[in-house]
Image (tube, grey):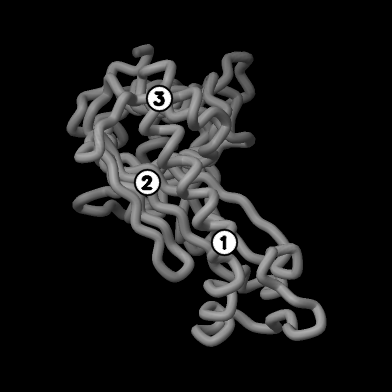
Amino acid sequence: MGADLPDTLIAELRFVGRDAGAVKALSGFRKKQHTLPTAANPTTQAFLARLCAPELAERAEALFQTLREALGYKRRDISLNVESAQALLRARDFTLEIAYELDPASPSDYLITQTLLDAHEAAVLASDAFNAVFRGAFSELSFALKRGVQVEAVIDAVEALDDADGGNSGGPGGRGGDRAAPLRVSYPSDYSYCEIAVEGVAARVRCTGASVDLLFPKGGSPLELLREFAAVRAAFQLSKELGALLA
């Protein structure tokens, strides 16, 4: 598989993909009849739900048929429910959610969030057929921390590695050595989150205290994201405190 991760850990991961579009481009929007939303609230969200219904139904049905064929599912192995601005596809090995919502920062646009979760069979995530369906589909990988953690403790754990190295990494607080630090941390002054750069990993690793999220510069398949997560998990073994986060 290329990602030495236990099935129990994989089942806790959420793969997230995001897309966006203009409300006026939806097939249900009528320029002479409708007015573009100027705020995101329950009323305008209900308006979006009516407008996006054809696109959502078509998108969800296409995924249903593609996954059924690609994975050889029988009727009892997969189901689809489309309601309001959300679609829920339940399969024997995973769940897929698709949600449309207005962009709060720009209500004349909408956001699409596609979330793959409850993937309890690593073999399915590793299969060529499955990854072909979701090629380039996901740009975030989220792992919820069951007990939570103080962001300050995570920051201290990363910075302690630099201290233990004698400050030779050349990173913040280091003494300007030539060797790059395997882990580097940045954070705002209120410690609401921190971001950890892991050597050799393209994703930004963000810890909010409630979750550890990998934010990728471009979309990838589930297996591609899993391999990066495995690399982060291995790098975190440099610290007992960090290693416990992704145990």
Q: Residues within 10 Å of mark 3 (few under 14, many from 20)?
A: some
Residue 96: x, y in percent? 37, 46
Q: Can you say which quadrant of the picture contains the C terminus?
A: top left
* Identity, as a three-letter code, of the amino acid under mark 3: Ala
Q: Earlier in the sequence, mark 1 or mark 3?
A: 1
Residue 82: x, y in percent? 40, 60
Q: In the visual, does 77 lie left or right of 150?
A: left
Residue at 21 percent across and 50 percent down: it is: 146
* Whether residue 174 can be seen here: no
The residue singled out by tag 1 in the image is 54
Q: In the visual, does 169 lie left or right of 212?
A: right
Residue 246: x, y in percent? 28, 35
Residue at 81 percent across and 83 percent down: it is: 32
Residue at 36 percent across and 32 percent down: it is: 68
Q: Residues within 10 Å of mark 1 (few under 14, many from 20)?
A: few
Say which of marks 2 and 1 sits in front.
1
The residue singled out by tag 2 in the image is 96
Q: Secondary structure at mark 3?
A: helix
Residue 94 image-quadrant placement? top left
Residue at 43 percent across and 37 percent down: it is: 65
Q: Earlier in the sequence, mark 2 or mark 1?
A: 1
Q: In the visual, does 68 lie left or right of 137?
A: left
Q: Disc 1 versus disc 3: distance between alpha carbons?
A: 24 Å
Total marks shown come to 3
Q: Secondary structure at mark 1?
A: helix
* Identity, as a three-letter code, of the amino acid under mark 1: Pro
Residue 70 numbered tag? 3
Q: Secondary structure at mark 2?
A: strand
* Identity, as a three-letter code, of the amino acid under mark 2: Leu
Q: Earlier in the sequence, mark 2 or mark 3?
A: 3
